[in-house]
Amino acid sequence: MADNNPQKGNLDNESQISPGTKFKELLRKKEFGVFLALLLIGLFFTIMTDRFLTVGNLMNVLRQTAVLGIITVGMTMLITSQEFDLSVGSIYALTPIIAGLLVRDFGLNIWVAVIITAGVAVIAGLINGFITVKIGIPSFITTLGTMMFFRGLTLILSDGWPIAGLPDSAFYSIVGGQFFSIPMQSIWFIIIVLIGYVVFERSKFGYKIFATGGNKEAAQLSGINTDKIKMICFILTALTATFAGLTDLGYLGSVSPTQGSGLELEVIAASVIGGTALFGGSGSIVGAFLGASIMGVVRNGLTLIGTSAYFKQALIGLVIVLAVIVNVKYTSNSE
Amino acid sequence: MSENIIEFKDITKNFGGTTALDHVSFTVKKGQVTGLVGENGAGKSTLVKICGGVFHPDEGEIILEGKKISIKSPRQAESMGISFVHQELPICKNLNVVQNIFLGPELPGKWGFPDKKYMYQEAKKLFDRLDVDIDPHKDVSRCSMGEQQLIMIARAISRDAKFILMDEPTTALSPKEVKVLYNVIDRLKEEGISVVFISHRLNEVQRVSDRICVLKDGEYVGSLSKEEASEDKIASMMVGRDVKIISKEENEDISDKNVLEVKNLTQQGLGLHDINLELKEGEILGIAGLRGAGRTELARSIIGNYKIDAGEILVEGKKVEINSPRDAIKNGIGYLPEDRGALGLFHKLSVRDNICMAEIDNFADKAGLVNRKKMNQVSEKYKKDLEIKMHSLNQNIISLSGGNQQKVLIARWLAVKPKILIMDEPTRGIDVGTKTEIRKLIMELVKQNFSIIMISSEMLEVMAISDRILVMSQGRISGEFSQKEATEEKIMKAAVAERTG
Ligand SMILES: Nc1ncnc2c1ncn2[C@@H]1O[C@H](COP(=O)(O)OP(=O)(O)OP(=O)(O)O)[C@@H](O)[C@H]1O
Ligand SMILES: [Mg+2]
């Protein structure tokens, strides 16, 4: 949180600055509620196990959270524009499968395959956007449909089999390797968050997302092409899902056609934990980062203290609800 | 009848850095109508919301019929006999009139099944009591704003309200509906129900109130009895100085060049028929008429919000294709909407972002990154020019008072500087002092080469500043007057003109 005004509207950054008010204003930031929740959860696991608070483990959490976090950045923009995308989990499988097939069966260079894959992502986003924006089907239904369609397509193309054993290339280590023993996935996670932050909260495009999701009619009267904004948000979301899939391809060296089922809901949960308004008009990338981190920390912590998989599932569900409650309460109290 | 229904004692309310109410004390007598007036941001709505259980006072007491009470929620207020009628009516649009009246915890009926027949009869009785004519089976979505308000009042008396608070109830009503409301208020009085009535139209306040209380900057200034009160007196008490009603001298600078021409515009669905108008450079063209005459629809058809069936639009003599408000802006036409909440405000954003949004492209550098400093400078300028009352540009827009929100929307268009600005009810919800300022500003704008179309239901306002006046009735232009010719009578006659042939 290097920036001093991430949430439009809440913070007064040019008023008389005395140390006291500065701290108070930090507390008033919307993201502080999520931050608090993350801290509490971290504290809990630190007490429960001494394996949690180590540099190695935290680095590991960041890597494990990368896929979720990268997609949450795109999803946060999309939800803020007042739309949803349930097909991200399927896109996350579809596009790396296509890349893998192009390399394995058509002998394409991975870099070329990646560019084609990005094109596929853009098309997937356009399909979601077109049906939603131009035909007027609620995005919840549109993307529920495309979620199944893309998943089916992935299974057809791969014949249901994972793809592995692709020829070596620098690409894989760049997206999924290590850099001085720091996992590249965590580095990419941070980079995407930073880019997302600038695009969403500093650029005119970002302002238009807030306007579109906050009051579509008013945005149109202000000369904003709300259809175009939503369309781009769909495309960006599909691109983040694709990029997340490619980093996993790099890290694992393989891709499974069934990967990422249920991921869409986790992404939406992370975004909402991070303070994104479900009905659009407000959201933050810092919040998205923290929201995804909470999900990652909980999963990691529960594994460390040796919870069974079934318990883990149930507990994660509880934590999602609790985190949102803490956040909502905190935000309404500080107003 | 001299008993007090409610007594406010030293009510204080702070919002962060703003003191909205500062030790306000006054009493409301049983069965009286109390007018509450004050400039934008004086604290009227805040006081009413405290009474209605929406906000809680930081200090002070509320005494209801001699008993000290604390109101925790709107529901509790309702159960104590305090009802709150405001502009954003909490009405369920998908239900009908009866359902809206009785919706609540104590729905009449047996075993959880509502007794429809009983409710219908009760609703009828309520409307008879108020002497209004509304079909209880009508869907609320088809009711006018006036009817919706009456439904809320019926709802209040069905719950044995003793005290009804009305925050700017007349802003969205037609003159006819206002009259109906006056009657209803008289009826309420007869039944011993007390009313607090807030409005920026001082003639209305004077007409309905037994006593008029004035707030200024969160402080209670004093009150006037019905006999003492005159519009001038109220205004000077509100503003703290005399308010001059400006009148317009003849505008010499109007060229004969047409900046905007509308030819034979027809929109069947909205009932607009064969509309022709022209706007000259540097002119203020007033469009008068009654609510429902099609003025807003005309404006929104011109800017491409609605697709027109026939006709053409020319900007500076050239035919233009306008399919969306975006196209309109590109052609130099801006539209300040009438419905502030639904079409104007970005409710979750700051004052600064609200001011700058229509101009956001020009606040960005080549890379598309927005220059906050520039946004702050521009916003700061309009904050000063329009005297927008706020404590910070980063403040959320909804924490501004109604009139100040309106000023923010005006600032949004001033920042864009379109050649042609269509202002739909620009002074709605704005206090007398500021109204004068805004009218001055409009007259100033045309000197800077803006051309303005001003739609207003306030006839005096149209006459005060327009160079030329068009009157609409039933989707047609039913009269045109120059500034000199125009009289209230002539305009009214054209406004109620029935369609012939
Ligand atoms: N939720 C809030 N948060 C912060 N400030 C607020 C909030 N609500 C009101 N205020 C401030 O309190 C002051 C009084 O506002 P209020 O809405 O009561 O004015 P008003 O007299 O109703 O004005 P108007 O005639 O424009 O409606 C204003 O300065 C306003 O900005
Ligand atoms: Mg108000």
Image (tube, coloured by chain):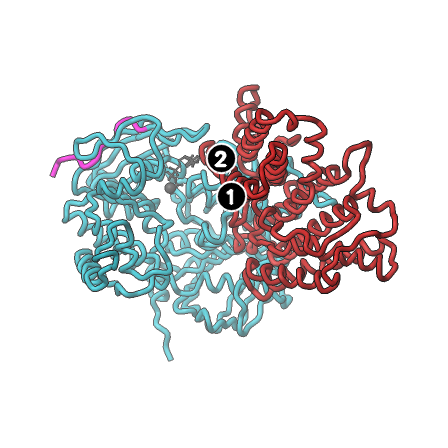
Q: Residue at x 82, y 56 (%)?
A: A113
**Quadrant position of residue B209:** top left
The amino acid type, in three-letter code, at marker 1 is: Lys
Q: Are marks 2 and 1 in contact (CB under 8 Å)?
A: no
Report the magenta residues as a range. B1-11
Which quarter of the image is occupied by the N terminus of chain A? top right
Location of mark 2 (residue): A326
- Where ligand 1 lies, by image quadrant? top left
Residue furthest bottom in the image: B501
Chain assignment, label 2: A
**Quadrant position of residue B2:** top left
Which percent across, then down, holds residue B201? 33, 47
Which percent across, then down, holds residue A56? 72, 29
Location of mark 1 (residue): B348
Cα separation between marks 2 and 1: 20 Å
Q: Residue at x 62, y 61 (%)?
A: A148
Q: Is disc 1 on the same chain as disc 2?
A: no
The amino acid type, in three-letter code, at marker 2 is: Val
Disc 2 residue crowd, few under 14, some 14–19, many 20+, Cα 10 Å: some
Chain assignment, label 1: B
| Residue B70 forms part of the magenta stretch | no
SS at mark 2?
Answer: helix
Q: Is residue B9 left or right of residue A12?
A: left
Magenta span dominant secondary structure: strand
Disc 1 residue crowd, few under 14, some 14–19, many 20+, Cα 10 Å: many
Color of chain A here?
red
